[in-house]
Image (cartoon, rainbow, N blue to C red):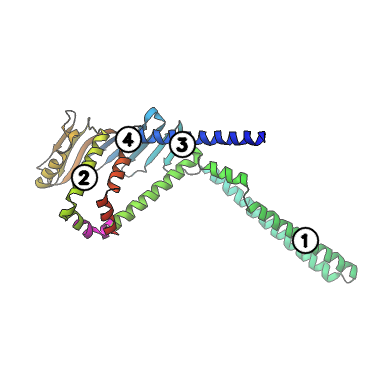
Amino acid sequence: MAIFLTILKIIGIILLCIIGLVLVILLYLLFGPFWFRVDGYIDREFNYNIKIKVTSFLHFLQVHVNQKKDEEREADCTIFGTLVKIFPKKEKDKSDKIEADKEDTEAIEASKDADTAKEKQAEAVDEAIESVVTDEATDVSKEVTVKEAEAADKTKDTKEVEAKPGIIDKIKAFFDKFNPKNLGEIIRNKIYEIKKKIRETIDELKDKKEKIFEILSNPENKEWLKKVLDQTVKLIKSFGINMRGTNLDFSTGSPDTTGQVCGVMSLFKPVYDKKVNILPDFQEDNFYLDGNVTIKGRIQLIFVVYFILVLYLDANTQKILKSLK
C-alpha cells in the first residue's frame, strides 16, 4: 500500500510540474513583450531588400527573416539558444545523394542476384522432380515444400511484427516532433497552411463583397464600426510604433492620389518624428518609391487577445457573422 501511495505521489508531482511549466509559458507568451524591427530598402527600379527581426523578453525566442528581389527567402529562429532553419528548405548534400545512389544500385544488384538464384533453385527442383520416380524422392520433395511453407509463414509473421510499431517507437516519434532538427519543417508546413486559409478567406470575402458593403453602409452599424475603430486605435497605440531613421521619396504618378496618400499618412503619429523624412513628389508622372523605411515597436499578445475577445463577443459582431454565412 505504501509503495502504491508513493507512486501516486510521484505521478502527482510530475503532473503539477508539467501544469506549472505550461502556465509559466502561457504567461510569458501573453504578458512578455516581443520587440520587432522592420528594415526595408527600395529604389526606383523596384530592387528591394526587407529584413524582419523579432526578439522576445530575455531573448528566449528570436526570429530573423530576409527577403531580396529575385532571391529565395531566408528565415530562421532561435529557441532557447537552438538555431532552427525555416527557409530555404534544407537539401541533402551531393555526397549523401551519391551514397544513396550507390546503396540503391547495390540493393538492385543484390535483388537481381537473389532472383537469379531463386530461378536456378526452381529449375533444379523441377529437374529433380522430373528425374525422381521412387516414393522416397516424392517424400523428400514433400518435406522440402513443407519446410519452405513454414519458412514463408515465419517471414510473414516477422514482417507483420515489424510493420506494427511498438510503444517505444510511438514515444520516439512523439518526441521527434520537438527535435530542433524537425522544427523547421513543422513551422514551414504551418506557414503554408496559414497562407492557404488566408487565401480561402479572402476569396470568400470577395464573393461576399456586396453583403460587406451593405453592412458597412447600414446606419444601424455605425456604433459597431465606431467600436471597431476605437479598439483598433488602442491596439495600434499599444504597439508603440516609431519610424525613426526612415528616409523615403515617393510618387503615385498623379498629384491627386499623391495628396490623398499624404492625407492618410498624416493621421499616424510616428510620421511627425524629427528623424522621419517622407517627401512626396507631385511632379513625377510615374509611380516610384526610393529610400529606406524603418519600423520599430513591441507587441504584447494579451492586448491582441483582448482586442479579439471584445469584438468577437459583441452582439453586433455575432449578428454580422451570421448574416455573412
Left or right: where 289 falls relative to 14: left
Q: Percent x, y for residue 301?
A: 34, 37
Asked which secondary structure carries label 1, the reply is: helix
**Residue at image x 38%, y 35%?**
29
CB under 8 Å between callouts 2 and 4? Answer: no
Main secondary structure of the magenta stretch: helix
Residue in view at x 15 percent, y 54 percent: 219
Q: Which mark is residue 300?
A: 4
In the rendered image, residue 200 lying in the magenta stretch gets the answer no
- Tell me which segment is drawn in magenta: 205-213
Q: What amino acid is at disc 4?
A: Gln
> Distance from label 1 to label 2 (Cα)?
80 Å
Q: CA distance from mark 2 to mark 4?
A: 21 Å
Foreground of the two, 275 or 13? 13
Callout 3–callout 2 Cβ contact below 8 Å: no
In the rendering, at what x and y percent does residue 116 appear? 71, 60
Left or right of 261, for residue 159: right
Nearer to us in this view, 129 or 221? 221
Which amino acid type is shown beneath numbered disc 3? Answer: Val
Question: Tag 3 or tag 4, which sits nearer the N-term?
Answer: 3
Q: Nearer the viewer, mark 2 or mark 4?
A: 2
- Residue assigned mark 2: 227
Q: Give the residue pinned by disc 1.
A: 148
Whole-percent x and y of residue 207?
A: 27, 60
Of callouts 1 and 2, the N-terminal one: 1
Label 3: element kind: helix
Q: Is residue 316 above or below residue 68?
A: below
Disc 1 residue crowd, few under 14, some 14–19, many 20+, Cα 10 Å = few
Q: Residue at x 36, y 52 (%)?
A: 197
Q: Earlier in the sequence, mark 4 or mark 1?
A: 1
Mark 1 vs mark 2, foreground winner is: 2
Q: Disc number at residue 22?
A: 3
